[in-house]
Image (cartoon, helix red, strand yellow):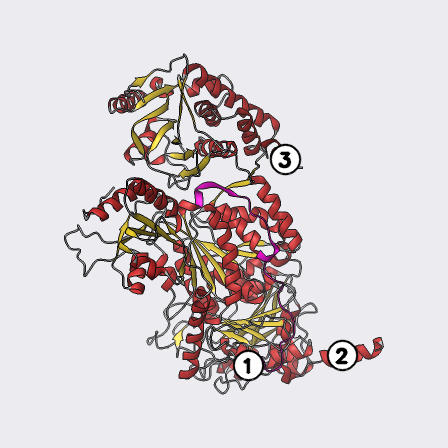
């Protein structure tokens, strides 16, 4: 076989179609933002020709975490709040795998909050999508940490008692943060561009996706849907490039250099208009798996050598003098 | 020994008594180096060919107040002519750096009546009259109670060599003990070179001078000494504590990732592993919490080789949800639980065997997992290798139950001969045959070959939800039952491969003492003594507790009476509200009763310290004689 034909064959083999990432028919509610995110992610996999066998999606528990069952890659549907540490273990064991984490506002910002903060610190090369619909859907409408003050739910029948937690400011407040972006499910082209930028970033990419829950909060985002000026697009040559079509509709734009963390924090604090785009990007932050994999390769020979050297330290030799000579560090 | 009195050090001809064994305690304030002294003594004796068991005496705080009864820190060293398997009964000789830490040991009942006490004498002239008075009163009272108290001017002698005697007294004491126990000074010097190996030669030299000064002082001033016959081992031996053995086992098992969160008394295993693991391509991840440590290990296991997480009881409680997920998704994982006193924060530095049932039955729902309990330092090493193998063969969680007693005790054992069979095979990256299903449970054994990310054609989503053979979420009755059934079958399949443990002593008799974990040495020593008294007593020690090997029920039935000895709580029949109907049995007794329908009694001690052979002897005698169980 010539090299050329081999290349052609390989091209054929490595080329994936959207269907290669489809698995089953999503069973989310009609109009659920999760459908838009799934579509964007499947498109991303196809466009980057991600080998399904070398791609792992890790999830916690919640509506968002039904996601893996609809992806034809490896998936790990874990336990509530713990998707991040599971994904970190996957990445540490197998840095060559492409690892994504899908989580929700309850999963990440409530029960898994400790892991979220530390995942930012570790800065492992993971793409994390926070499906933030401001409500617990799977357990049927309870307030979540991102529910706005006054929001009525089954656990807050007289309205939510607390100010909502802002996932962007929290993430931007953690040392070692390297990528923070925000998308909304109702602008699919930007949703795709933002997830693609997150995927390209080497480090922990945090993408908060504001999404609608037509079942429990059908009107929550109507004001933003009806008034494009209440969405603030962040554009920059190092960030998002806004296409002409989108720019025509969403005129409220701001040039924001994503390397400016102070500006990023200021923008992150905005609630109305909703900022959409890349708030912060620093490709220079080292990844934990790179820092930690600096040692030797794990081979039987290396294990033998290392173990024998350690045993030498603690060995009492039958012939003390010979033992001494052997046990002396070189 | 002489009628115990307060003795002044006397020069003169030494009388050397030959002993079969002796128990020595060295206690000081925290930070005065008694622990290093004890460990060095153990090391020298081991190299001489004595049987050795050393135990740490640990205060609960890092820096407890100086001169406090609760602050005693140091070592117990039991030396013998033969192999020593436990810390023994009360101490025969104590070296105390002040009278308060000594009192701590007296009050804990750790000293033999009339035993020899070598006491630092500097406090007699302390500037604080309260201290001087306390010293004199304690010294005189102990002498009056029959202890042989010998005052030693340790501080004064050390000050001749170093400005800060606090940092050097331990080596002076080591020299003294080398003289008292007729140990080889060449080995002692080597031991010091080894202990201070990372520091510069000047430090080693100072310590050797202190060692020699201690020996010279003892030679000149102490008119007694001991000799414990020693027999050099023919094979190389290693001397480590249980936690180091666990860490070495992790290294030898071929695991690559250990995820942990700091917790006493487990952490020293991870400390050591952090130091050495990277040299063989492994890594220790200190996670943000116990839950994350377990999830990290689980993720690593799922995507690669089986990983390990090391913890103690409170951490284990937090890991339960992750362990449940590993059981449900059938991902291999090794979990080490170095037990401490519980419940809740309990007694962090003290030993207990209180976690057996929560480990076996923990996690909601039916969550079968393998539980094995090493019973010696050597076992700690091999248990990890076995655990990793079982975990990967059966796609199960394997819990290794050690405890604070094994964690800090040292005992020489044959140097392991490394075998590549111990290692995990490389991660399978071959293509999955068309039509293969991720949970293709074998009907007889429940076993299946798991698909690992990277294997083409094996893409599936692992889930903690009930699932079918395709790993699809399945809420139907058949799929749920099929999954539960196969996960349970794996335990039985493993059980079929296990050998029944050997009975220690005669195969039948009047009483069988059953134990598990760190109590093995003490139980077997007690049984030996009882046999020596003409009693028909044997012992059985379980390493696999879940599953339990076949043949145990038969062994139990060959004895007239059966009693477990455990370090977890069992209600006592002498308590007025306790009767046969409401009595809560100790963990193993409960398991044996329910599985074998044998009337198994239990005797237990939850005082946080290793159970003494003498206590077991008394309990067994009472059981044989139908007398009430004795209490310490």
The residue positioned 36% from the left and 60% from the top of the image is B552
In the structure shown, which secondary structural element does the residue marked by tag 2 occupy?
Answer: helix
Q: Is residue B302 magenta?
A: no
* Circle 2 or circle 3, nearest the eye: 3
Badge 2 crowding class, 10 Å Cα cut-off, few under 14, some 14 to 19, many 20 or more, is few
Marks 1 and 3 sit apart, C-alpha to C-alpha, by 59 Å
Discs 2, 1 touching: Cβ within 8 Å: no
Q: Whole-Å distance between the Cαs marked 2 and 3?
A: 57 Å
Q: Secondary structure at mark 3?
A: loop
Q: Do the dots labelled 1 and 3 sit on one chain?
A: yes
Q: A184 or B601: which is nearer to us?
A: B601
Instruction: State which tag comes first along the sequence, 2 or 3.
Output: 2
Q: Which residues are magenta?
A: B407-436
Q: Is residue B68 above or below residue B420?
A: above
Q: Position of residue B151 (x, y in %)?
A: 36, 19
Q: Say which mark, if any, is on residue A70.
A: 1
């Amino acid at each position: 076989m010539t090299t050329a034909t081999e290349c052609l064959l390989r091209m054929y083999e490595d080329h994936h179609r959207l269907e290669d990432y489809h698995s089953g028919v999503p069973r989310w509610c009609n109009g659920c933002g999760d459908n838009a995110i799934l579509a964007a992610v499947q498109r991303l996999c196809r466009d980057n020709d991600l080998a399904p066998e070398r791609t792992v999606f890790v999830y916690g528990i919640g509506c968002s975490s039904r996601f893996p069952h609809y992806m034809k890659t490896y998936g790990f549907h874990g336990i509530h709040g713990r998707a991040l540490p599971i994904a970190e273990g996957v990445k540490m064991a197998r840095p060559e795998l492409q690892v994504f984490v899908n989580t929700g506002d309850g999963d990440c910002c409530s029960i898994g909050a400790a892991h979220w903060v530390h995942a930012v610190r570790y800065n492992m090369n993971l793409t994390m999508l926070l499906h933030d619909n401001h409500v617990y859907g799977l357990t049927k409408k309870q307030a979540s940490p991102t529910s706005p003050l006054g929001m009525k739910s089954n656990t807050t029948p007289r309205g939510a008692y607390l100010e909502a937690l802002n996932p962007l400011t929290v993430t931007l407040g953690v040392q070692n943060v390297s990528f923070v972006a925000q998308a909304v499910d109702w602008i699919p082209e930007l949703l795709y561009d933002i997830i693609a930028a997150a995927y390209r970033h080497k480090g922990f990419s945090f993408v908060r996706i504001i999404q609608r829950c037509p079942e429990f909060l059908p009107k929550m985002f109507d004001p933003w849907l009806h008034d494009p000026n209440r969405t603030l697009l962040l554009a920059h040559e190092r960030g998002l490039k806004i296409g002409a079509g989108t720019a025509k509709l969403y005129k409220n734009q701001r040039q924001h250099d994503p390397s400016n963390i102070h500006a990023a924090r200021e923008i992150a604090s905005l609630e109305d208009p909703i900022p959409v785009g890349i708030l912060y990007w620093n490709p220079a932050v080292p990844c934990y798996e790179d820092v930690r994999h600096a040692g030797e390769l794990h081979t039987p020979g290396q294990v033998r050598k290392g173990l024998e050297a350690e045993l030498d330290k603690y060995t009492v030799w039958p012939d003390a003098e010979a033992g001494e000579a052997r046990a002396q560090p070189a | 020994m002489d009628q115990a009195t307060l003795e002044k050090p006397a020069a003169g001809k030494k009388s050397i008594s030959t002993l079969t064994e002796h128990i020595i305690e060295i206690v000081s304030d925290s930070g005065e180096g008694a622990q290093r002294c004890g460990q060095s003594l153990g090391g020298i004796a081991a190299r001489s060919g004595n049987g050795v068991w050393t135990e740490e005496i640990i205060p609960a705080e890092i820096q407890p107040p100086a001169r406090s009864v609760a602050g005693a820190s140091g070592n117990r060293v039991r030396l013998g002519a033969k192999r020593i398997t436990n810390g023994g009964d009360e101490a025969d000789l104590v070296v105390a750096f002040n009278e308060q830490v000594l009192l701590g040991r007296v009050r804990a009942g750790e000293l033999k009546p009339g035993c020899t006490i070598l006491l630092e004498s500097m406090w007699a002239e302390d500037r604080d009259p309260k201290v001087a008075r306390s010293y004199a009163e304690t010294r005189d009272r102990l002498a009056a109670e029959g202890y042989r108290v010998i005052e030693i001017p340790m501080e004064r002698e050390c000050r001749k060599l170093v400005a800060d005697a606090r940092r050097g007294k331990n080596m002076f004491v080591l020299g003294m003990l080398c003289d008292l126990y007729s140990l080889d000074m060449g080995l002692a010097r080597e031991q010091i070179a080894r202990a201070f190996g990372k520091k510069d030669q000047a430090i080693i030299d100072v310590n050797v001078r202190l060692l020699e000064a201690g020996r010279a002082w003892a030679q000149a001033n102490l008119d007694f000494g001991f000799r414990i016959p020693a027999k050099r081992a023919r094979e190389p031996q290693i001397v480590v504590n249980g936690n180091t053995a666990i860490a070495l086992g992790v290294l030898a098992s071929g695991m690559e990732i250990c995820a942990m969160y700091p917790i006493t008394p487990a952490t020293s295993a991870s400390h050591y592993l952090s130091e050495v693991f990277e040299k063989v391509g492994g890594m220790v991840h200190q996670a943000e919490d116990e839950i994350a440590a377990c999830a990290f290990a689980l993720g690593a296991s799922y995507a690669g080789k089986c990983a390990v997480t090391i913890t103690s009881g409170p951490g284990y409680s937090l890991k339960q949800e992750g362990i449940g997920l590993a059981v449900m998704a059938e991902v291999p994982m090794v979990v080490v639980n170095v037990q401490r006193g519980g419940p809740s924060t309990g007694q962090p530095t003290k030993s207990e065997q209180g976690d057996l049932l929560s480990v076996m039955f923990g996690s909601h729902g039916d969550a079968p997992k393998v539980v094995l309990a090493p019973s010696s330092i050597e076992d700690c090493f091999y248990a990890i290798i076995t655990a990793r193998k079982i975990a990967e063969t059966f796609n199960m969680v394997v819990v290794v139950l050690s405890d604070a007693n094994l964690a800090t005790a040292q005992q020489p054992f044959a140097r392991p001969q490394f075998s590549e069979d111990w290692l995990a095979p490389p991660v399978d990256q071959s293509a999955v045959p068309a039509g293969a299903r991720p949970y293709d449970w074998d009907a007889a054994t429940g076993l299946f070959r798991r698909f690992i990310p990277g294997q083409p054609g094996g893409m599936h989503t692992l889930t903690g939800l009930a699932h079918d053979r395709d790993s699809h979420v399945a809420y139907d009755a058949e799929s749920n039952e099929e999954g539960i059934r196969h996960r349970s079958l794996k335990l039985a399949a493993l059980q079929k491969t296990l050998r029944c443990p050997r009975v220690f002593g005669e195969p039948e008799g009047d009483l069988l003492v059953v134990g598990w974990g760190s109590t093995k040495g003490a139980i077997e020593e007690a049984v030996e003594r009882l046999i020596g008294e003409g009693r028909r007593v044997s012992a059985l020690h379980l390493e696999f507790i879940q599953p339990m090997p076949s043949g145990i029920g038969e062994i139990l039935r060959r004895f007239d009476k059966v009693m477990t000895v455990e370090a977890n709580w069992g209600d006592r029949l002498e308590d007025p509200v306790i009767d046969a109907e409401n009595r809560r049995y100790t963990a193993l007794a409960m398991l044996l009763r329910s599985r074998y329908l044998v009337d198994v009694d239990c005797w237990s001690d939850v005082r946080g310290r290793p159970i003494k052979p003498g206590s077991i002897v008394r309990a067994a005698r009472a059981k044989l004689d139908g007398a009430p169980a004795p209490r310490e």
